[in-house]
Image (spheres, rainbow, N blue to C red):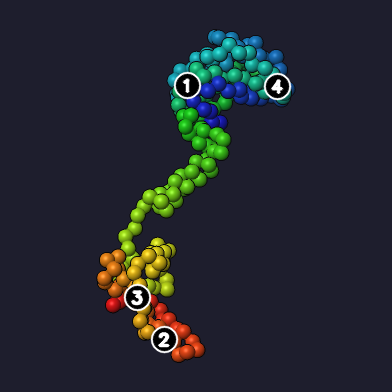
């Protein structure tokens, strides 16, 4: 089954048509008969009764019993299954083709420029942009930072250390809450004249 874009004219390779007698020899002279409004190519939209095509464009034999056949915007205007058939029992075995007509939006997403990959990339980019530039997060809490934690928590601690008030004595560095009064975290420091040392950050005060 082939996919078609709704209400869009298209040309398909219809066939192969072969001789009714041997089932092998390509039939190359069917174009005029195919184009008959009453006995030519018939189409059924979404299970409806068969009717003539909505175009007078003459099919053109291509090769090996295949005919380049136009389906007009009127032929592809109905969503769902589209069947095209031609039968001339005295000359050729019957041939039919099935199509699935999908909306322009679905077609463009799947088969248009960039296709589904571009659509998905755009969606991912939007989500990332929202996460980085739109969504806001409160200040990291007072718990001791863990070695294994989420990237959100790790960034939160870094931002808190960078932004908030800090004080230092000879033995302790204190990091304050946003109120600049409450100590949320601290670390012990020492300096023996040779080596300066800072311990891991822990909860305060």
Q: Could you say which is closer to the camera, residue 169 or residue 90?
A: 169
Residue 86, above or below 112: above
Q: Are marks 2 and 4 in contact (CB under 8 Å)?
A: no
Residue at point 53% right, 28% down?
A: 4
Examine the image and state in which quarter residue 141 appears: bottom left
Residue 89, above or below 182: above
Tell which tag, 2 or 4, sits nearer the viewer. Answer: 2
Residue 60, percent across and down?
67, 17
Q: Are marks 4 and 3 in contact (CB under 8 Å)?
A: no
Residue 77's label in the rendered image is: 1
* Distance of label 1 from label 3 (alpha carbons): 73 Å
* Distance of label 3 from label 2 (alpha carbons): 15 Å
Tell which tag, 1 or 4, sits nearer the viewer. Answer: 1
* Distance of label 4 from label 3 (alpha carbons): 85 Å
Q: Earlier in the sequence, mark 1 or mark 3?
A: 1
Q: Which residue is the site of mark 3?
A: 167
* Distance of label 2 from label 4 (alpha carbons): 88 Å
Residue 62's label in the rendered image is: 4
10 Å crowding of disc 1: few (<14), some (14-19), many (20+): some
* Distance of label 2 from label 1 (alpha carbons): 80 Å
In the rendered image, the quadrant that contains the C terminus is bottom left
Residue 125's label in the rendered image is: none
SS state under label 1: loop
Q: Earlier in the sequence, mark 2 or mark 4?
A: 4
Note whether residue 162 is visible.
yes
Residue 190's label in the rendered image is: 2
SS state under label 2: strand
Q: Is residue 180 left or right of residue 74?
A: left
């Amino acid at each position: 089954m082939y996919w078609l874009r709704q209400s869009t004219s298209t040309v398909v390779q219809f066939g192969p048509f072969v001789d009714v007698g041997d089932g092998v020899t390509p039939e190359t002279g069917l174009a005029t008969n195919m184009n008959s409004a009453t006995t030519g190519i018939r189409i059924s939209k979404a299970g409806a009764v068969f009717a003539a095509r909505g175009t007078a464009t003459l099919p053109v034999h291509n090769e090996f019993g295949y005919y380049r056949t136009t389906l007009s915007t009127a032929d592809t205007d109905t969503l769902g299954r589209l069947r095209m058939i031609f039968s001339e029992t005295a000359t050729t075995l019957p041939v039919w083709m099935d199509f699935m007509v999908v909306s322009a939006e679905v077609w463009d997403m799947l088969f248009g420029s960039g296709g589904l990959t571009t659509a998905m990339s755009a969606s991912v980019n939007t989500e990332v942009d929202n996460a980085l530039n739109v969504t806001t997060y409160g200040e990291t809490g007072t718990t001791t930072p863990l070695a294994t934690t989420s990237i959100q928590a790790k960034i939160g601690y870094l931002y808190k250390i960078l932004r908030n008030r800090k004080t230092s004595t000879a033995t302790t560095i204190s990091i304050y809450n946003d109120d600049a009064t409450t100590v949320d975290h601290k670390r012990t420091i020492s300096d023996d004249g040779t080596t300066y040392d800072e311990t891991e950050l822990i909860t305060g005060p």
